[in-house]
Amino acid sequence: MKNEKSTPSLNSKKRSKLLKRILMIGLPILAVIALIVPTNNYIEVPGTTESVNQMVKVDGKKDQSKGNFYLTTVEIAQANLAMMIYAHFNSFATIYSAEDLMGNLSNSQYDLVNQFYMQTAQNTAIYQAFKQAKMPYELKYDGVYVLDISKNSTFNDKLQIADTVTEVNGKSFKSSEEMMKFIQKQKVGDPVNIKVTRIDGGNHSFDGHFVKISTGKTGIGISLVDHTEVITTPKVTIDAGQIGGPSAGMMFTLEIYSQITGKNLRDGREIAGTGTINSDGSIGQIGGVDKKIATASKEGANLFLVPDSGSKKADDNNYLAAKAAAKKLNTKMKIIPVKTLQDAITYLETGKIND
């Protein structure tokens, strides 16, 4: 018995040609949509490895010693469909919803908050470096940073995130506690004038009224934190360009400390790292540590200093997450756990890790 192949009908051939034409036209359109149309998600991937030596000046001079201290970054961008697909197949890419990443902040507010965190990290780095070196410094109180503005604040459409409030009703203060005590003695509904400075250097004056805050006390409706400035001799300046966030604090501190003490902590090595610097000298946890390991390894760093919280869970301990990332990359870069600034200095001077 012979097997016979059926011959496609004329209609079948036309449908086949039509389908091919639709695919030829449709696929490029879908590709364009995937590349252009944004989603409501953001993708985080490895960023850059930047030499801190080139950002920090002490007495107007850059560090010319051999080797480098590097800060490491992540890159965050609003994701299109193509980027979402890419992230699905890349273990060093993470997708966040807008709410998970920024909460209730707008893009511009999120950027301002990150600028604030960077400025605070630099300030704390200078303070800690001089304190560690036992060199004199002065803390100057400049006002309070605005971190959030309540919906019932009469300054809601006037203040911006990261503004610094310098005066209330013509009075300046020596601490945020002193300012809040003054405000809490006022009556809800009474008029109030505040003076503020902005990150761009602009000065502004706004009028409003005192309101009742969530604690039931009188306020102006802002979340705040002290804005202090460290005055030192020699003078230290830091220019990190458009990089934001607090995670370069430790690396700034090590660079400043090296310069003001003359200690050659790098010893010609390429040393990358990440971690916040806190007012007590502890090194704080950061986000995206796996991506930072990836960029530092790619750029040829010898060592990577990373916060160690002491937790046994990688989700709560940058050190464990960093080791897992390094193993995945099969990198030769050494991962060094640090809990304090002194831990980092001790390792760089002796090669020993504090328990």
Image (cartoon, rainbow, N blue to C red):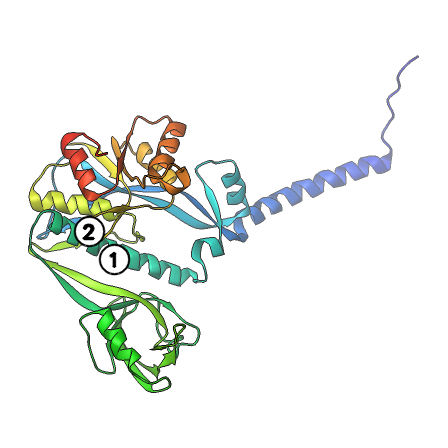
Circle nearer the N terminus (1, 2): 1
Residue 290 visible: yes
29 shown above or below 144: above
Residue located 34% across and 87% down the image: 190
Q: Residue at x 25, y 41 (%)?
A: 339
- Residue at far right of view: 1
Q: Tag 1: residue type?
A: Gln
Q: Nearer the viewer, residue 188 or 160?
A: 188
Which element type, helix, strand or loop, lies under badge 2?
Answer: helix
In the picture shown, does residue 211 fall above or below 284?
A: below
Percent x, y for residue 322?
35, 35
Measured along the vertical axis of the image, is residue 270 above or below residue 132?
Answer: above
Q: Is residue 7 left or right of residue 160?
A: right
Disc 2 marks a residue whose amino acid type is: Ala
**Residue 267, visible in the rendered structure:** no
Query: Rounded to the nearest whole Å, what is the CA distance between mark 1 and mark 2?
Result: 10 Å
Disc 1 crowd rating (10 Å Cα; few below 14, some 14-19, many 20+) is many
Work out whether 219 lies above or below 228: below
Query: Would residue 27 appear left or right of 94 to someone viewing this image?
Result: right
Q: Residue 91: percent from the left, percent from the top?
A: 46, 36
Q: Which residue is mark 1?
A: 119
Quadrant assignment for the C terminus: top left
Residue 226 location, x and y as percent?
24, 65
Q: Quadrant of the N terminus?
A: top right
* Nearest to the observer: residue 194 or residue 22: 194
User: Which quadrant of the structure image shows residue 71?
Assistant: top left
The residue tagged 2 is: 125
Residue 79 % position (x, y): 49, 49
